[in-house]
Amino acid sequence: MKSRAVIINGGFGIDHLDAVTREEREPGHGEALVRIEAVSLNRRDVLLAQGIYNPRQKLPIVPCSDGAGVVAAVGPGCKRVKLGDRVVIHMFPGWLAGEPDRDKLATGLGGPGGDGTLRQHISISENTLIALPKSLSVNAAATLPCAALTAWSAIVESGQVRAGDHVMVQGTGGVSLFALQFAKMCGAHVVATTSSDEKAQKLRALGADAVVNYRTNKDWAAEGRDLAGGRIDLIVDVGGADTLDAGLRVIRPGGTIALIGVLSGAKAEINLPLAVMRQVRLQGVTCGHRESFEAMLRAIGQHGIDPVIDTIYPLEEARAAFAQMAENRHVGKILVCP
Ligand SMILES: NC(=O)c1ccc[n+]([C@@H]2O[C@H](COP(=O)([O-])OP(=O)(O)OC[C@H]3O[C@@H](n4cnc5c(N)ncnc54)[C@H](OP(=O)(O)O)[C@@H]3O)[C@@H](O)[C@H]2O)c1
């Protein structure tokens, strides 16, 4: 069948994102055809388009890992989903449960696993689809696969945040806002950082107990610790090069730094003895598996967590959506609706 899709076409760069009509295959055994209604962007998608995520990425490729929509057809042997089901796509079709390994991680959509979700239709294994609870809109569901599941892994699965803990989150991007929401859900005190006073107001409205501007305050990490009463149990680090060492200096002995992103650079100079002598846990986090996604969906339903959506674009304006994220002109998630 003919279907619209966005591909990175003929070279890297946001101006190489083209909307095209192409052939979409019918669902095979154990697969469903999903009519994708909403896709959310992640920083990884922008980096893929810019040739930074994987400079050797073969082109053309359909970018993006996140999507939600409605089952439009089912292949033979399909049991998990049926025609008309509203579903969200788990971004690692090969990582359904258990510890990650190279093979599971190589299945990431819109990257090592091949074509992603920025298209009207996708034929995909039914095992990677999760039916949506009635309370969750397709747009809200589309924000979850990468950013929310990563934040869930950092706060709930590996972080095991408990009521009364103090958590620091960085910036107002997708991962950090979900981390803020999940940390509040767990009963933690949350200090958030941001580059702008305008964004700070939005963080407070979302429940941040304290906000620090890291642009105007060079000692943002120490200020954040002071605002948390001198104790930070967990830092959700998305800054990388510019933030890791500062975090190490303020995390409590025995605390955890969840290493998630490298927004300011991939190589950090850090004071290793601080990690050793204070017995700090440096925990790398990569998204999560489908079972964890299902647990997260239950928690989102029970706690009425509402994903923050900044802007919604039609498929034909995908370039504008990518440019908005590249320039950090967003709070929370950006959607493209094919
Ligand atoms: N490991 C994983 O599985 C995984 C999954 C998802 C994302 N990530 C990574 O996590 C990072 C965030 O992803 P995202 O999709 O949430 O990105 P995003 O939505 O684009 O977030 C960007 C925001 O982060 C803040 N920021 C930018 N530079 C910063 C810095 N140097 N220090 C502190 N904050 C900074 C800015 O907010 P303010 O203007 O408010 O400061 C910016 O708007 C990226 O590096 C991404 O690749 C990793």
Image (spheres, rainbow, N blue to C red):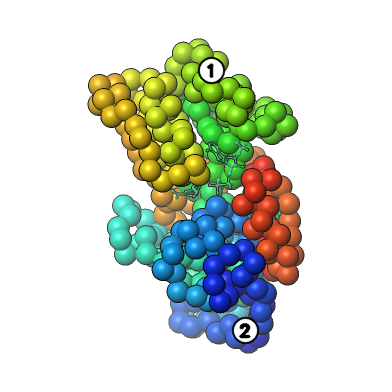
Residue 159 vs residue 118, the one in the foreground: 118
Along the line of sight, which residue is nearer the eye, 278 or 294?
Answer: 278
Mark 2 belongs to which amino acid? Answer: Arg
Q: What residue does disc 1 label? A: 223
Q: Toward the viewer: 267 or 183? A: 267
Q: Secondary structure at mark 2?
A: strand
Q: Residue at x 38, y 43 (%)?
A: 267
- Percent from the top left, x then y, of residue 278? 29, 21
Label number found at residue 302:
none
View quadrant of ligand 1: top right
Label 2 Cα crowd, 10 Å radius (few <14 / some 14-19 / many 20+): few
Lower sequence index among marks 2 and 1: 2
Quadrant in the picture for residue 105: bottom left
Residue 187: image location, x then y, percent: 53, 26
In the displayed structure, 170 sits above or below 134; it is above
Is residue 181 toward the left or the right of residue 135 in the image? Answer: left
Q: Which residue is mark 2?
A: 22
The residue under the point 61% across, 70% down is: 16
Q: Where, by quadrant of the figure, is residue 283 drawn?
A: top left
Q: Is residue 189 visible?
A: no
Q: Are marks 2 and 1 in contact (CB under 8 Å)?
A: no
Q: Is mark 2 within 8 Å of ligand 1?
A: no
